[in-house]
Image (cartoon, grey):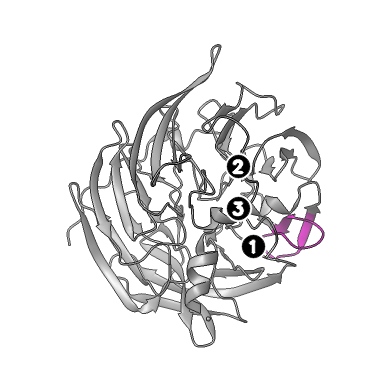
Amino acid sequence: MPAKHVGGAALAVLLLASVAASSPPAPPLRMDRLASVYGAGWSTAHADAGNTDYSPVVGARNLTPAWQRGFSGSIYLGATNDAAGRVYVTTNGTGCHLHALDTATGKTAWCSGEVDREAIASSALLDRDGRIYLADGKAMHSFDADGNLRWETPIVGTPLSAQFTPAGNLVFITHIGRVYVLDRETGEPVLPPVELIPGAPDTDDTRACMRGTAECPSSNTLAVDLATGRIFFTFWDKGAPAADIRAMQLTEGDDPSIRPLWRNESLPGGSATSPDLSADGSRLYVGDNEGGIHALDTATGDTIWSHDTGYAAGGSSSLSPDGLIMPAGGGDGALMAIRDAGDRAERVWTKEGLVNRGIPVQAAGGVAYATVSAALGNDLVVVDTATGAELDRERLPGATLFSVGTTVAPDGTVLVPTITGELFAFRPG
């Protein structure tokens, strides 16, 4: 294990240990989600500004293997993709750490060594103009569509993926708790960095980020409400007995600022899950390290309900527009679906025979894609989200251990990266 082993996908700890009713009306999907500067496709680590790990592409119910790529080192996060037919993946092996691939063939279009190995902590963020944004342990970088460096801005700490703001700026929080807002065109700071823990960091070791424990104050990707400018993130304050979930108000324009709104201290043991924002912006969902998933009121931070999954999830949940939640795997946790039923959570189904080995992703059309344990390895399964019924199963060849963030391309291609440095692509069959 390298001295700095950033776990953007917290499955690296939780899964390695195990490997040795009625539905409420769907809330409206607000147009601000569609009119942003995000690129068309899976353009950020968890699909969108709300971290939903949900694709609006109608998902295929049957898949067929398309191609497979192996990379030096590991992959920690899902591969982002765009409407121009490119897939972007970060690795920590020798040589390049940012790879741009052809979605159809998996062949390398270009790769960049401008970022160091700490870039593995983030997925590449893509804007609607075809430009790429990726941080490492020293700076935030921007590239054009051909991989040429546009700008780089020094930072302190390592972010775990960035997001865009309502005005189209770049916002991210480094693992030591420094909030940055940068101009997307130039990389210049929009406002001075905000130090959530004043002073120099106690350590530069980011291994604790895999579990979201006290040694890594900011361990996940922030969610952004593009309608209000509110940002939401998990945080473990210095000396605090547990982690919390926080909201801050970002104001842009002539007098930019960030101010605290609320915090909810409901994350015992820390959190390995990035917060998910509901489609109507009224609720926030987040998991803790003791098996709990919590729904919070985004206006006040009050807990609406909590649900025990029976295990600590090793990654972020997938959230559909109508409130169906599929937690990530952890230990021997089974694949399951939970629905937000208003004042409570309802377990929709649990598939004890499908041990969840990754971060599931839901897609339009009522399907989900999940990595599950199989004899001497893992399989990718397609399931019906209403019932959990298995619709298709495809093998992930080799000793893949677990996946770290399945994503869906605009053409319906399903991309499955694994901790062992493999990237598998499956086409609609």
Is residue 102 one of those drawn in magenta? yes
Q: Which residue is mark 1?
A: 75
Question: What's the amino acid at mark 2?
Answer: Asp
Label ID, residue 2: none
Magenta segment: 91-110
> Mainly helix, strand or loop, the magenta region?
loop
Expressed as whole percent of the image width and height from the top left, the position of residue 29 reads: 36, 40
Residue nearer the viewer, 171 or 169: 171
Observer-side mark, 2 or 3, equals 2
Can you see residue 153?
Answer: yes
Question: What's the amino acid at mark 3?
Answer: Thr
Residue nearer the viewer, 176 or 365: 176
Badge 3 local density, few (<14 within 10 Å), some, or many (20+)? many
- C-alpha separation, residue under disc 2 versus residue under disc 3: 32 Å
Label ID, residue 80: 3
Residue nearer the viewer, 413 or 210: 210
Expressed as whole percent of the image width and height from the top left, the position of residue 223 reads: 46, 40
Which corner quadrant holds the N terminus?
bottom right
Q: Which residue is mark 2?
A: 202
- C-alpha separation, residue under disc 3 versus residue under disc 1: 13 Å
The secondary element bearing badge 2 is classed as loop
Expressed as whole percent of the image width and height from the top left, the position of residue 259 reads: 45, 23
Q: Is 340 displayed left or right of 326 in the figure? A: left
- C-alpha separation, residue under disc 1 versus residue under disc 2: 27 Å
Badge 2 local density, few (<14 within 10 Å), some, or many (20+)? few
Residue nearer the viewer, 137 or 342: 137
